[in-house]
Image: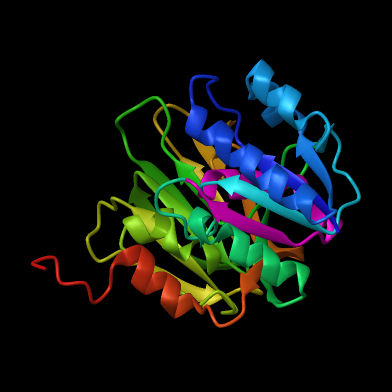
Amino acid sequence: MKVALFGSSFNKQAPKAESQIITVCMFLHSRASQVFLNQSLYQSLSKQGQLMLKELCTPFTDLPDADIALSIGGDGTFLRTANTVGRSGMPVLGINTGRLGFLADINFHDLDETLDEIFNGEYIIEERQLLEVSNNKSGAESQYALNEVALLKQDTSSMLTIHTYIDNDYLTSYQADGLIVATPTGSTAYALSVGGPILMPKSSSLVLAPIAPHNLTSRPLVVNDDVKIRIKTESRSNTFLVSTDGNSNIFKTSTEISISRADYTLKVIKRVGHSFYDTLRDKLLWGVDVRK
């Protein structure tokens, strides 16, 4: 099996993070795998770490022809891995060494057991929808988001006015600090923190969730995922921010933003017998009595 290993560059004074990467590489190499290691991650290792992995892994810059991708880190690392994998169809497994870990939901101490299951073909592939974000600027390329697209105020304390249309039907003009459009995958991320609902990963829906709306009756809205969302903005600063999974760009208010379902999906590897309900209980501590 060919495995592409992704992770975030880290400070060379982080021995625990380095030892985790080395542990993964050694395990994969022991299973006669061909292991590719992201170049920026390799460069962030200590000289000793690079020397240890020199015979175990092949550093890469361009996406290699691998069977699976392993994302070692938190959800941010997983999102960057998803962006790199793109349309390749390469399935991604998230190993959590961060904090919450909704996307990277495999705990590091379960690594050996999980990888043994994968080598034995005992795993499930979930297809996760993405959002395509485009604008009316000439020559602009589309951006893609697995979690969410957020339109945010920029360089001012004044609110944005966000004129929102769904399939060319006018919805409303939010006066708020911003607006989040989230996939089911992203419903447990930024959208959740502003009061949005949790959607099942396979739901054919999107969430529109205003951020600190001036009108308290402006509530999160769930729509079908086959709609096209068109947004025009007004701002005293004449600019606004568009964030796609945390990657931000500044636009003039004359820029119109369009958001729709992408024409490809991300394949995510899940363990057999581990459901989304397990993840909710584990990550959100549902049913836990804090008095005990």
Is 178 placed left or right of 73 in the picture? left
Residue, x 43% and y 52% (percent of image)? 179
State the image coordinates of residue 168 (x, y, percent, origin top left): 62, 67
Is 19 placed left or right of 284 in the picture? right
Is 103 placed left or right of 235 in the picture? right
Q: Which of 60 and 136 is in front in this view?
A: 60
Q: Can residue 256 be seen in this view?
A: no
Of all residues, the one furthest to the right in this rendering is: 65
Quadrant hosting residue 146? bottom right
Residue 87 is covered by the magenta coloring: yes
Q: Which of 113 and 261 is in front in this view?
A: 113
Vertical order, 54 against 290 (above or below)? above
Quadrant hosting residue 270? bottom right
Vertical order, 28 against 226 (above or below)? above
- Is the magenta region chiefly helix, strand or loop? helix
Residue 203 is covered by the magenta coloring: no
Q: How is the image coloured?
A: rainbow
State the image coordinates of residue 185 (x, y, percent, origin top left): 54, 65
State the image coordinates of residue 96 (x, y, percent, origin top left): 51, 52
Q: Can residue 47 be seen in this view?
A: yes
Quadrant where the image shows the C terminus: bottom left
Of all residues, the one furthest to the top in this rendering is: 47
Residue, x 45% and y 40% (percent of image)? 234
The residues colored magenta run: 75-97
State the image coordinates of residue 82 (x, y, percent, origin top left): 69, 51
